[in-house]
Amino acid sequence: MSKSKVAIGIAPSTLLQSDAVILSESVMKRWNIPATQSVTLQFGSWYEQIRIIPAAKQKGIMLNTTLAKTLAFHRTNTPTYIHLKYIAETKTLQLGPIIGILVSKDFPDDLSRPFGAISRFCLEVSEAAHAQGAYVFFFTPKHMRIDTHSVFGWTYHDHWQQKQMPIPHVIYNRLSSRKIESSPTVQQFWKFVTNKYNTTIFNEQFLDKTEVFQALEQHGTVRTYLPESKPLASMNTLKQMSNKYSTLFVKPVEGSMGRGIIRITADTTNGYQVQRTTNQGTRHGQYTNLTQLYTRLFRKKTTKYQVQQGLRLIEVQKRPVDFRVLAQKNHLGEWSITSTVARIAGSQHFVSNIARGGTLSRVEEAISKSNILTPNNGLELITRLKHAAMQIAKAIDKQLEAHFAELGIDFAVDRFGRIWLLEVNSKPSKNDNTPLKDGKIRPSVKKMIAYAKYISEF
């Protein structure tokens, strides 16, 4: 099997028939592609028998306008590149990789922001794919079509437009709703494309906090990072944990972005103080005993919770600080660290999530301003955070069956410099409020495209 990145040209039908393509003579010689026989041209789920016409002066591949339209290629002001892969055993010339980005919803009436808060991220992905010779499109569950073996997706070529697309080689799951993700429409489509077209889906599911902690507890190398955590199964669980720790955190098992987190602090004179995250800030409550607290907050709730040992996080100006490490698989399919940042809680919140009013900071700067007791210059902490994140990402790969290639791993650091795992997020935020210099493509986006190329073998 041979592969190469080549430029795509489009010729009018008067110069090139639709059942033929013009291909660089040097590429044909290198791969030993027959010019006298027909071969199968394949683009995702779409394929057709074609003739290949060798041309000494052709640097890439030239398509007829009808064929280019079928493949959803467009004439552009800048060269378009794609990877070719020739499989001699089956005489198949494949174009790719095709990467489908699955998002929850789109807004066809607003072409300036067709994907709402993640529109800039989607544009970055398109630009990164173009630079790396990959074809990318975006689609939602309503665009899935098993009957036609295709997807009605969005592409960006000078502007956003929708076209019928083949089933892609790779799907990157960016669904932001657990309900949508588990719907029959999505699950049936995933089963169909993986069985029929061997499509690879990564970050295929949300993570369950309890499931993650229980899996990591079985892995000796990461157990030291885990605060004691238990599923909140009953009043007895809450009482047992309260007897051991003066502060507890109770978190929705399926929560994200800091939603619904509850902090319980024992007060020797007034019972228990409770703080709850809301969109407006932190709500406060007071309960005389645990029975009253449990009855009011948890007994009738259908939400599943995890109760966790309270940690005394380091603070900057009395605001808690935690750390987000982004781990991703790279162009070799190996885990690597893309970024490490500190997150400082907002003035009205006790959690540091950006969605809850938190702000980003460089790790060194946050450490220098914090109340940490042990000598620490920030760089040493970054090294330890990266090491912990690598261990946890590899452990999740080993312990959980789902395919993950990107994990946002959140850590706390106590005043003595000890690192604790808070949670692992399989859908790190891509919202447009992420700080970014104009015209720049995030390293995380480039790495995601590189990994998609790796797993599709282009």
Image: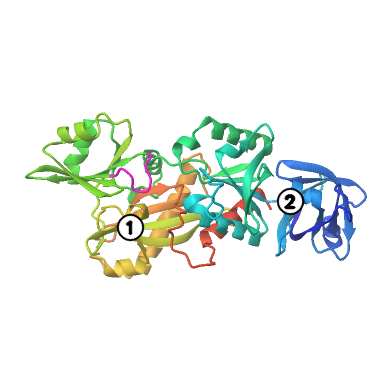
The residue under the point 56% across, 57% down is 123
Query: Which residue position holds label 1?
Result: 358
Residue range corresponding to the magenta coloring:
254-261
**Residue 230 position within the rendered picture, expressed as x and y whole percent measured from the top left:** 30, 38
Residue 125 lies within the magenta run: no
**Residue 168 position within the rendered picture, expressed as x and y whole percent measured from the top left:** 65, 44
Amino acid type of the residue tagged 2 in the rendering:
Leu
Answer with left or right where residue 50 lies relative to residue 307. right
**On screen, 40 above or below 76?**
above
The nearer-to-camera label among 2 and 1 is: 1
Quadrant in the rendering for residue 211:
top left
Label 2: how many Cα within 10 Å (few below 14, some 14–19, many 20+): many
Label 1: how many Cα within 10 Å (few below 14, some 14–19, many 20+): many
The residue closer to the viewer here, 262 or 238, is: 262
Direction front: furthest residue: 109
Direction right: furthest residue: 36
The residue under the point 28% across, 61% down is 417
**On screen, 431 above or below 302?**
below
**Residue 136 position within the rendered picture, expressed as x and y whole percent measured from the top left:** 63, 52
Q: Main secondary structure of the magenta part?
A: loop
**On screen, 247 above or below 417?**
above
Report the number of discs: 2
The earlier-in-sequence mark between 2 and 1 is 2
Answer with left or right where residue 151 lies relative to residue 327. right
Amino acid type of the residue tagged 1 in the rendering:
Gly
Query: Which residue position holds label 2?
Result: 95
Between the C-alphas of marks 2 and 1, the distance is 44 Å
- Residue 90 in view in this figure: no
Direction left: furthest residue: 269
